[in-house]
């Protein structure tokens, strides 16, 4: 496979594929691999970029799980669950239909996913016009769509169906309905039978599955079927024969809309009265029913005399609809509003702020180091923490404020009705301080959810909060979210367990960082980097080697210092391809120098970041570069920083040992500024310690720096390691270091970093001698 991939890349194709790798601990590591061919300074190179797909796979699994649960839930709904979209150009589609759609419409989901014309044309020719008019009216007024019509399927049979759905308007101007379509053929047949003749009415009264009633509008007398009484929990003889038996059981909140529907039908505005409402059962519970009624006789003046109809128990359907709505708008773990409902609440808060001329506040809260808890104790235990955090957040805000889950371990709080002036910032800060306090209190986590653990554990976790204020609609909801996000990351950068308000200067920094990130990615693609080399000398000032230092030749800004772009490369992972290029280029330069008698003795030190060293195939990459360039590995020295020792020391030792066996040397850079654990230091196969320039700078004036420098030299000598000092700028500094046993130096006294062409020229006298 590798040969095929490299052949395709060499032919000019950018080859991309997914590959299942293994981490050093044996766990699977899915990666996205991109391979391209490039020629650099006459040499042919393959650029391979690997991206970790673990988080994306996890998100996809969660999304699929939610979708599967939704589909299982739709199977419980009588009839068809569907989505119907009407586009601005008048075309339509059905993005989702449940399994019952094929049985009811005689069409597959694929046939209507992009074009709903076939589904609409299933309507009876006499009903098409009314169907389309009802859809257009719902779209125009953004009111619920409820409509009865007939379906005519391929075998010639007709079915009465009832559609019921809620519309929402999307940003592209289209309208999307979510709802149900149920087969009401039996009920319509029962209603038709009632209208056709008294005999058939009596038959329907006894045999219909739905509760049937017959109301004499003039006298107030009423007849109720046995099923109608059973639905409400009554036996024969427990219900009288008057209309008050019906009206007295309608929920008070529903009565106005029920009477309005009946009146609209009596006035001839609708073919029938149809509405869902609640009725009181004998046991005191409320039953959701779909009530339908129709005037079947009028006097000579058109005054209604008799109204007949049915009541169907739709309690289960309503419960299922409520569950589906809950899934659409609420987070299933915490039962908080999800991102979709959050944005709606934020829009409402902006409107309220405009009306009342008062400030509101948007807070974005992120749990500090939550990933560690998930990785060590599992997602079930992590979910426990999120549920408890939810409870604490809700208790920390006012009843009218909103707490939502933004995703993962991020929560959003919307505070409304704050002060009209700058006091609003103080009010928001007080709430945020309260939240920081309650969230940071210990959590008692049940570990029995994790296999093999049977106890509880007290866990401490903090949070970081970003806050932005708003008043009116001067900023969009999306912009407010971005500002809160920016402030939150500033809080994290400031030490965590803290809060920050959004600052426009902060936004400028973020924008500049985004630009730098984009430019840096282009630099990797376009090969805009070059290497500078700073001499390393012995006690006599003779060059013994050089440190390879990467520089970015920006097409517009010129030479960019690594101080500016290396930290960003570390965060984004671009340090991996950059580091590989640096190593390849430095090795190629070493090979070139070996052909020059006066430079063949030189060594080259290459910096390796912690992220680069911990990469799964780092060792293989280094060995492959040695083999491909033909460099003498004994002239290559890898400089590691002490921060590398903060994670998985055993893996570090293993990798260093493998590379050491090939002759590669190791120097511990910036020694004395970081971890400095002698218990680990003595186990590392090092060759050299490097005294950090921060100690060298003030070694003549600061007794502490002088003592540290002496100690590092003594430690290196006791462990049989070489020692070199960086940042040597004056002869006095060199003399102090030499007097204390340090005989190798690097710094401006001996030469600044320079391109390879300048470095390779005859050196003459050193800067010190000059």
Image (tube, rainbow, N blue to C red):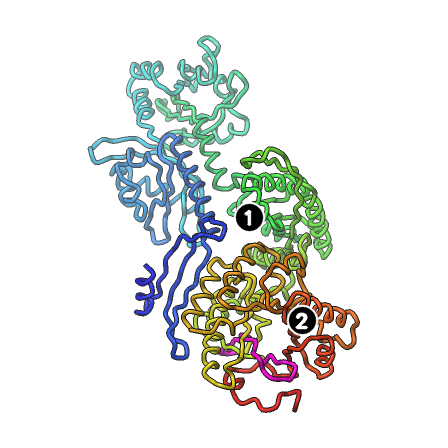
Q: Residue at x 75, y 75 (%)?
A: 699
Please provide percent x and percent y for residue 210: 38, 21
- In the displayed structure, would residue 557 be above or below residue 307? below
Mark 1: which secondary structure? strand
**Residue lying furthest left:** 155
Residue 66 in view, yes or no? yes
Residue at (71% x, 76% y) in the render: 697
Q: Quadrant of the C terminus?
A: bottom right
Q: CA distance from mark 1 to mark 2?
A: 46 Å
Q: Residue at x 70, y 55 (%)?
A: 425
- Name the residue beneath numbered marker 2: 691
Q: Given contact means CB atoms under 8 Å apart, are the residues at marks 1 and 2 in contact? A: no
Q: Is 599 within the magenta?
A: no
Residue drawn where x is 74% and y is 82% of the image: 732
Nearest to the observer: residue 681 or residue 474: 681
- Residue 561 locus on image (x, y percent): 58, 75
Q: Is residue 342 above or below residue 527?
A: above
Observer-nearest residue: 762 or 260? Answer: 762
Identify which residue, 389 or 172, lies in the foreground.
Answer: 389
Q: For this view, does 281 lie left or right of residue 538?
A: left
Q: Is residue 549 magenta?
A: yes
* Residue that mark 1 sits on: 406
Between 170 and 112, the one lying in front of the other is 112
* The N terminus, quarter of image: bottom left
Residue stretch rendered in magenta on the structure: 535-557
Q: Is residue 366 above or below residue 740?
A: above
Q: Quadrant of residue 532?
A: bottom right
Left or right: residue 640 versus residue 29 is: right
């Amino acid at each position: 496979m590798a040969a095929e991939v490299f052949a395709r890349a060499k032919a000019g194709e950018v080859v991309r594929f997914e590959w299942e790798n293994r981490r050093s601990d044996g766990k699977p590591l899915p990666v996205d691999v991109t391979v391209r061919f490039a020629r650099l300074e006459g040499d042919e190179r393959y650029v391979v970029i690997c991206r970790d797909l673990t988080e994306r796979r996890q998100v996809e699994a969660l999304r699929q799980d939610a979708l599967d649960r939704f589909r299982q839930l739709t199977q419980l709904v009588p009839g068809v669950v569907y989505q119907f979209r009407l586009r601005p150009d008048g075309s339509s589609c059905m993005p989702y239909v449940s399994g019952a759609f094929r049985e009811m419409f005689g069409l597959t989901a694929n046939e209507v996913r992009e074009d709903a014309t076939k589904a609409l044309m299933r309507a009876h020719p006499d009903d098409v016009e009314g169907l389309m008019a009802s859809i257009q009216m719902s779209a125009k007024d953004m009111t619920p769509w409820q409509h009865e019509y007939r379906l005519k399927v391929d075998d010639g049979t007709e079915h009465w169906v009832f559609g019921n759905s809620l519309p929402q308007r999307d940003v592209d101007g289209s309208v999307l309905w979510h709802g149900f379509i149920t087969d009401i053929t039996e009920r319509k047949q029962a209603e038709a039978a009632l209208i056709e003749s008294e005999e058939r009415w009596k038959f329907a009264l006894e045999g219909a599955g739905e509760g049937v009633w017959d109301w004499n509008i003039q006298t107030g007398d009423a007849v109720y079927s046995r099923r109608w009484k059973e639905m409400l929990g009554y036996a024969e003889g427990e219900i009288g024969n008057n209309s008050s038996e019906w009206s007295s059981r309608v929920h008070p909140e529903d009565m106005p809309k029920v009477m309005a529907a009946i009146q609209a039908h009596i006035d001839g505005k609708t073919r029938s009265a149809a509405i869902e409402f609640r009725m009181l059962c004998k046991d005191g519970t409320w039953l959701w029913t779909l009530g339908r009624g129709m005037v079947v006789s009028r006097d000579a003046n058109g005054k209604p005399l008799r109204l007949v109809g049915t009541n169907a128990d739709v309690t289960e359907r309503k419960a299922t609809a409520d569950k589906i709505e809950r899934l659409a708008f609420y987070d299933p773990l915490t039962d908080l509003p999800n991102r979709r409902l959050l944005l709606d609440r934020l829009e409402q808060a902006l409107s309220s702020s405009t009306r009342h001329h008062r400030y509101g506040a948007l807070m974005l809260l992120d749990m500090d180091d939550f990933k560690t808890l998930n990785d060590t104790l599992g997602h079930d235990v992590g979910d426990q923490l999120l549920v408890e955090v939810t409870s604490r957040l809700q208790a920390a805000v006012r009843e009218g404020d909103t707490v939502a889950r933004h995703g993962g371990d991020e929560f959003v709080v919307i505070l409304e009705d704050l002060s009209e002036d700058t006091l609003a910032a103080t009010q928001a800060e007080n709430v945020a301080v309260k939240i920081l306090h309650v969230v940071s209190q210990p959590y008692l986590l049940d570990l029995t959810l994790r296999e093999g653990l049977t106890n509880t554990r007290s866990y401490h976790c903090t949070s970081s909060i970003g806050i932005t204020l708003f008043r009116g609609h001067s900023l969009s909801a999306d912009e407010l979210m971005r500002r809160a996000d920016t402030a939150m990351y500033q809080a994290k950068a400031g030490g965590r367990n803290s809060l920050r308000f959004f600052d426009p200067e902060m936004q400028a920094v973020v924008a500049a960082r985004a630009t730098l990130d984009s430019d840096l990615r282009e630099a990797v693609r376009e090969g805009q980097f070059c290497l500078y080399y700073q001499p390393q000398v012995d006690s006599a000032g003779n060059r013994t080697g050089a440190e390879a230092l990467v520089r970015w030749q920006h097409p517009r800004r010129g030479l960019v210092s690594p101080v500016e772009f290396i930290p960003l490369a570390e965060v984004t992972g671009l340090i991996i391809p950059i580091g590989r290029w640096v190593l390849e280029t430095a090795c190629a330069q070493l090979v070139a120098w070996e052909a020059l008698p006066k430079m063949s003795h030189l060594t080259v030190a290459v910096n390796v970041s912690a992220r680069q060293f911990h990469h799964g195939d780092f060792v293989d990459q280094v060995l492959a570069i040695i083999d491909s360039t033909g460099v003498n590995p004994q002239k290559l020295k890898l400089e590691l920083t002490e921060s590398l020792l903060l994670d998985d020391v055993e893996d570090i030792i293993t990798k260093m040992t493998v590379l050491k066996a090939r002759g590669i040397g190791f120097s511990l850079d910036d020694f004395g500024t970081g971890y400095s654990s002698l218990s680990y230091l003595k186990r590392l196969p090092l060759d050299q310690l490097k005294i950090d320039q921060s100690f060298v700078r003030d070694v003549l004036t600061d007794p502490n720096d002088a003592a540290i420098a002496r100690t590092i030299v003594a430690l290196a000598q006791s462990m049989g390691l070489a020692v070199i000092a960086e940042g040597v700028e004056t002869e006095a500094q060199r003399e102090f270091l030499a007097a204390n046993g340090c005989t190798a130096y690097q710094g401006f006294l001996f030469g600044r970093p320079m391109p390879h062409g300048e470095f390779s020229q005859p050196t003459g006298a050193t800067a010190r001698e000059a």
